[in-house]
Amino acid sequence: MSDLRVRFAPSPTGYLHVGGARTALFNWLLARKQGGTFILRIEDTDVERSTKESVDAILQGMEWLGLDWDEGPFYQSENFPLYKQHVQQLLDEGKAYRCYCSPEELEARREQAMREGRKPKYDGRCRNLKDAPADKPSVVRFLAPQEGSTSFDDLIKGTISFPNEELDDLIIQRSDGTPTYNFCVVIDDASMRITTVIRGDDHVNNTPRQIQLYQALGFPVPQFAHVPMILGSDKARLSKRHGATSVIAYRDMGFLPEALNNYLVRLGWSHGDDEIFSRDEMVAKFDIGSVGRSASVFNSDKLLWLNAHYIKSGDPQRLSRLLLPFLAERGIDPAAGGPDLAAAVTTLQERARTMLEMADAVLFYYRAPEAYDQAALAKFEKAHLMAVYGVVAEKLAAATATTAAEFDALFKEICTENGWKMPQVGQPVRIALSGGTQAPGIGEMIVTLGTAEVVRRIERARQAVSE
Ligand code: GLU
């Protein structure tokens, strides 16, 4: 075990967003690569917006992606005594003070500053207050240094420096006694001994304030790595407008977790020209320093391409397990009869790009067609169809073939004997078996369905054509 300690700290105000998932993945990868510790912390201090459903959705997303955590989940809402204690410590040490300015007073001063062309910033008037006004509610403000600057060496963005005069005295405790966001993050990261904070770069502006708090509290300052945002195709921040952004929505659209992980790792990070990374390869090759500095554009076509790759090369048994819920939605239970699901899946791995496509394509194995693609049938003369169905049914009923290759050979033979071309036989048979023309190779289909069922379906199609 190395000393590296990282965390993913989502706010439970919605589902797990793909951007959050990528941040979680980068943290997880670094922890696994260095033998460090990956911690999950739920930042639920915003009671109004945090929900249990959202926590569950985030945990479900993490589990589905296989991003297992070593400690947690910890909940900020359970840490209030610790935050209070540290607010008190800063007050006792004269590093924080009570401020009695009301929100209305602050707003009026802010407007005046704007009118006068000054930066709206807290003017520090309660800093040296001798007599506290009686019965007036107060907040606690951090006494921020006014001179010099606060800098850090971001592992992704390089050195970032903020002049201290631009940072005003941060409110660390509200008038109702609750601690504020930046303060909780610092207390938690310090008490969890986080060594490297990897998070979205929408938090860059919080970092100097947090560093000042670490320093005031006497805590070691962690390293920071701010990951650039994910954008939609119009270069605006990725949102629902651009399509699905929830990890679970991708699962439900038939994406595999390894495809989404592979896609997300490449979004902003590269290793030469490599595109395909198994989990182990990702862990071995990931390096936070190689994450790019600019934002990345989400490309659903590439995700689809990766998904097709993982379906093609996937283990049929595992794909079958993942397919079951999709089949259940379609009213199919493969255990109730029909071909072995893994065998059926094998025949479709080359063509299905998602598990949804796979589910639709596999249906015919379990449900004989109720209707036939009339446009496809209309390409053949009725007499030809009757002849094909008659010959094929007869040949199959007598066939001793057992493998796909043997059945393919049998169909070649049928073609030669009757002077037909392969599509003149193949298409009508596909229509008879599946209802349409988009189906796997003839030999594979027959082996998977079994000759008895194939003959039954051909007879039925013949009947339908004759009517
Ligand atoms: N809770 C914050 C968020 O969801 C993350 C804060 C952090 O990583 O420091 O954006």
Image: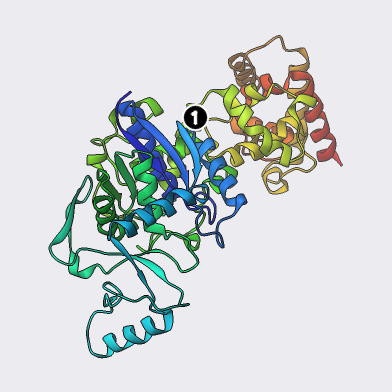
Left or right? Give the position of 46 relative to 85.
right
**Up-down: is 177 above or below 370?**
below
Query: Vertically, is 155 above or below 129?
Result: above
Secondary structure of the residue carrying numbered label 1: helix
Q: In this view, does 185 lie to the left or right of 210?
A: right
Left or right of 434, for residue 205: left
Q: Name the residue under label 1.
A: 312
The answer to whether any part of residue 75 appears in the image is yes
Q: Quadrant of residue 103?
A: bottom left
Q: In which quarter of the image is residue 114?
A: bottom left
Q: Which residue ends up furthest to the right in the rendered image?
A: 467
Q: Which of 82 and 354 is in front in this view?
A: 82
460, 207: nearer the viewer: 207
Work out whether residue 419 can be spotted. Answer: no
Residue 38: x and y, percent?
A: 40, 34
Quadrant where the C terminus is found in the figure: top right
